[in-house]
Amino acid sequence: MVNRATWPSETAYRSDGDIATVCPLLGLPPELLLQIVSHLSIIEEICLFMTCKQLYAAYGPIPKLESVQVHRPAAAIPQSFYSYTSVGLRWKLLRYLENDRWKACFRCLVLHPPASFPMHKEDFEHEELPCSLGLLAGIVDICPCKKLTFHETMGLRETLRIRQRSLGALSTQLVPGSLEPFCWHSCTHHSGSTQLAIAVFPRLESEDQLIIKTEYQLSITQEHPGVEPSTPYQACAHRYLDSWLASVCQRTPYGLPDRHCNPCSKIFRCEFCNTTLKCLHVRPRGNVDGQEKRTYLFYTERNLGRASSFPDKIWAAQRSHPL
């Protein structure tokens, strides 16, 4: 890969007086540039586009960039999750980007300043070296495109506090019951003929506990969910989305979910992290784009722990990485 330090210096001046660096590669014919990129490894290609934002804007986004996000397979999370391809690739990229100012953290899967690692590197394998958050640090999957580190949950809590203060100041001007829940994120994903719409609604409860309610709208062509894997996503760090929904939607001989029996009550709650899943409504089969589909409306609720400077066991139970 070309060393950035050897590139000739080319600069241009913006209207605000700042100097904007012009990437020399932008002067190459597109055919030649694409030929160069085709010979790079995924890691080298990502580093190239991170180095030159103008190049990324002109020729990106590159589909392969998704491979360094922390996705998980459709299968249940095995204890060998550490070796899963996307995590391994992201870790390799972080190690590639390390320098004197930034060090890779295996638990958070981000770069930290060296001061964030109070332990001596010589006493640990690099993958085991804990940052200042300790052994309970890690990543929580919120949806396929949203992952939260512990530091990011602190930022989300502050956003919710600011919103609460703002709404408190306007409370006399609002009609009771007119306030919409705070939708922090929404997205839609397709897997074959299956469509999954997701909306995330965070809120603060007692002791500043961060509760994440995630609403799903799953449209599938088969008669019942879980008959065959239709989405490669998890409802929590321990449960498939499809199979858990299928368990919750089990029917009694009377056609209603038996929510009162002991086994059924356990179905609604993950025994490892206490995440709950509830199905609100099943729409009858309808014809969408020439295909008959059944739509399931359901949601999960997860507790990401209390407000603190360090992760607690409630947070740690929700982690998808590391297990």
Image (cartoon, rainbow, N blue to C red):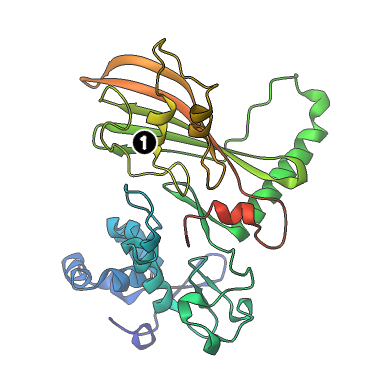
Where residue 316 sits: x, y (%)?
58, 57
User: Along the horizontal axis of the image, is 166 left or right of 26?
Assistant: right
Residue 77: tell me if it is visible: yes
* As drawn, 33 above or below 78: below
- Mark 1 lies on a secondary structure that is helix
Among the 4 quarters of the image, the one containing residue 292: top left
Residue 22: tell me if it is visible: no
User: Along the horizontal axis of the image, is 219 left or right of 165?
Assistant: left
Where residue 132 sits: x, y (%)?
64, 73
- Along the line of sight, the residue nearer the viewer: 119 or 53: 119
- Farthest-out residue, front: 262
- Along the line of sight, the residue nearer the viewer: 64 or 220: 220
Where residue 115 sits: x, y (%)?
63, 80
- Along the line of sight, the residue nearer the viewer: 105 or 6: 105
Callout 1 amino acid: Ser
Q: Residues within 10 Å of mark 1 (few under 14, many from 20)?
A: some
- Farthest-out residue, top: 254
Where residue 197 sits: x, y (%)?
41, 33
Q: Which quadrant: the N terminus? A: bottom left
Seen at 59% across and 63% down, the residue is 136
Seen at 75% across and 19% down, the residue is 176
User: Along the horizontal axis of the image, is 321 left or right of 26?
Assistant: right
* As drawn, 228 above or below 321: above
- Along the line of sight, the residue nearer the viewer: 101 or 108: 108
Seen at 47% across and 82% down, the residue is 125
What residue is pinned by disc 1? 243
